[in-house]
Image: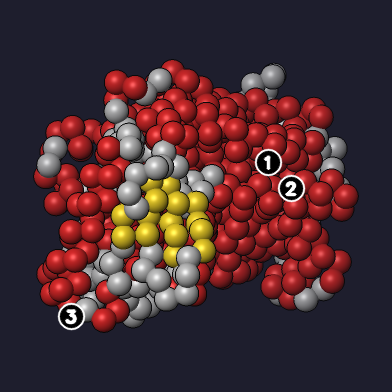
Amino acid sequence: MATSTLTASGPGIDAAHRRVIFASSLGTVFEWYDFYLYGSLAAIISKQFFSGVNETTGFIFALLAFAAGFAVRPFGALVFGRLGDLAGRKHTFLITIVIMGLATALVGLLPSYASVGVLAPISLIVLRLLQGLALGGEYGGAATYVGEHAPPGKRGLYTSWIQTTATLGLFLSLVVILVCRMVLKADFDTWGWRIPFLLSFILLAFSVYIRLQLAESPVFIEMKARGTRSKAPLTESFARWPNMRLVILALLGATAGQAVVWYCGQFYALFFLTQVLKVDPQPANLLVAAALLVATPFFLVFGSLSDRIGRKKVVLAGCLLAALTYVPIFKGVTHFANPAIEAAASQSPVTVVADPEACSFQFDPVGKKKFVRSCDIAKAALAKAGVPYANEAGPAGSVAQIRIGNATPVESVEGGTMTPADFKAANEKFGKTLSGALKDAGYPAKADPAQINYFMVFVLLWVLVIYVTMVYGPIAAWLIELFPANIRYTSMSLPYHIGNGWFGGFLPTVAFALVALTGDIYYGLRYPIIVALMTLIVGWLFLPETKDKASP
């Protein structure tokens, strides 16, 4: 491979390299647009496709359908990673973008549960799986393609442009949703939510056109000419211990922590604002979008910094800062976004007094369970209201009670022995009584816009996204340089997508379940904190620094 092919003119990026980065990044913007779109609309999607179960279970199902796309990403990494090492980088990520684009757009055409029953959620999950498979091959292709065009000493900067696309994809989805909400108003929740998905047809056509203009990676062309391509990428990547060891270390010491910091700073922050603190979706989306817009250039800052001081130092520093500061930052978000919840919880703390044996972990992946015992009903009602609560063991066989400060306890409903009609009536009466008691104690039904300190919430969200830029900006360059070129696409894709697909993709679902279980609205943060600390330790002790590696 001629050195002149890879040399950028001056301190900037020449026209040929700009075209490579633009084409790869544009396609990835589109890829991530869909995943963020679904995450932002999870509450509406739960009503459209999972209305056959109760509201709490329906929302968990919607999160699980979202997570299903992440669950299959490692399998997509194997399928398309192998294809990319055998047939070429360009052809492979053309295939992935077509699959992803069609599956995204078709979500906007799916009938609802009210129209076709159980076929609706099944169809949605099938499309999510297809999207996840395609994305499993997309990132590795784009990162490898750009990295193999980048000159030595600038690989962190060049590949960090791809990292901006995840945030830009979220930003684009938020803008589209906000515009549709403002124009369609009440119609958005009934049919207007389909429009952002249908726009994917346009994005797909444009992205495919741009990628068709690309030539194959110079590194792959050289391997093909010399006959050094791998004949069995899967075997060489995962059946030979030296490389498999590196794959495992890349997962535990780099991508797992990067993933939870990324998803906590972008996905979970928005979830926390809207679902826990009850901030209206429009201002919450605007705050997150503003933080992302202002922080996005720092992907390039930390990518370029990694070219000077090392990938490892920057990524692991981001993990450490996140682990140390997540709890105070999210407590600050509560203080500035919904101070009424904070004040009420301090003045009139809520406690669920119940027989521990009568309390379930309210997670049902097949929708067969009925949570009708008094403890479950009490906790579900409080979780839905966004009210933090403590747990206290009550006498065996007793009906659960909700104690709100010094007020008379509110007794829950024991629905196990009631007819469906009686249970419905009793549950509705309990709900009204609880709502009144919470209101009297100062717990708001939703955040008061007049009490939100928008500037301080923006600052805290911006800090969370800065952590994202630290861990995500240099990650592609680090992974590319860890693995040899003939099995790079396969080897780097698997740890990246297990890290981001499983450790990161399941973060909202795991955190939500932990909060519902304990009543502590910050308890879900334990998951990303523990994973980030694990990555810090493993990465620092066992992964090498790669910034001075001359060849891609």
From the viewer's perspective, is the residue at label 1 or at label 3 nearer?
3
Quarter location, residue 353: bottom left
Q: Secondary structure at mark 1?
A: helix
| Amino acid bearing label 1 | Ala
| Amino acid bearing label 3 | Thr
Q: Classify mark 2: residues with Cα within 10 Å, few (<14), some (14-19) or many (20+).
A: many
Which coloring applies here?
secondary structure
Gap in Å between the C-alphas at discs 1 and 3? 48 Å
Q: Are marks 1 and 2 in contact (CB under 8 Å)?
A: yes
Q: Are marks 1 and 3 in contact (CB under 8 Å)?
A: no
- Ranked by sequence position, the earlier of labels 1 and 3 is 1
Q: Is residue 138 above or below residue 199?
A: below
Q: Is residue 226 left or right of residue 463?
A: right
Q: Is residue 338 left or right of residue 83?
A: left
Quarter location, residue 13: top right
**Residue 489 visible to the viewer:** no
Of 264 and 109, the residue lying toward us: 264
Of 437 and 326, the residue lying toward us: 437
Q: On the image, numbered disc 2 is attached to which residue?
A: 533
Q: Secondary structure at mark 2?
A: helix
Of 127 and 357, the residue lying toward us: 357
Residue at image location 72% in from the left, 54% down from the top: 222
**Residue 336 visible to the viewer:** yes
Q: Is residue 448 above or below residue 67?
A: above
From the viewer's perspective, is the residue at label 3 or at label 2 nearer?
3
Where residue 323 is drawn, which disc sits there? 1
Residue at image location 44% in from the left, 18% down from the top: 455
Q: On the image, numbered disc 3 is attached to which residue?
A: 419
Q: Are marks 3 and 2 in contact (CB under 8 Å)?
A: no
Residue 8 locus on image (x, y percent): 68, 27
- Ranked by sequence position, the earlier of labels 1 and 2 is 1
Residue 518 locus on image (x, y percent): 51, 56
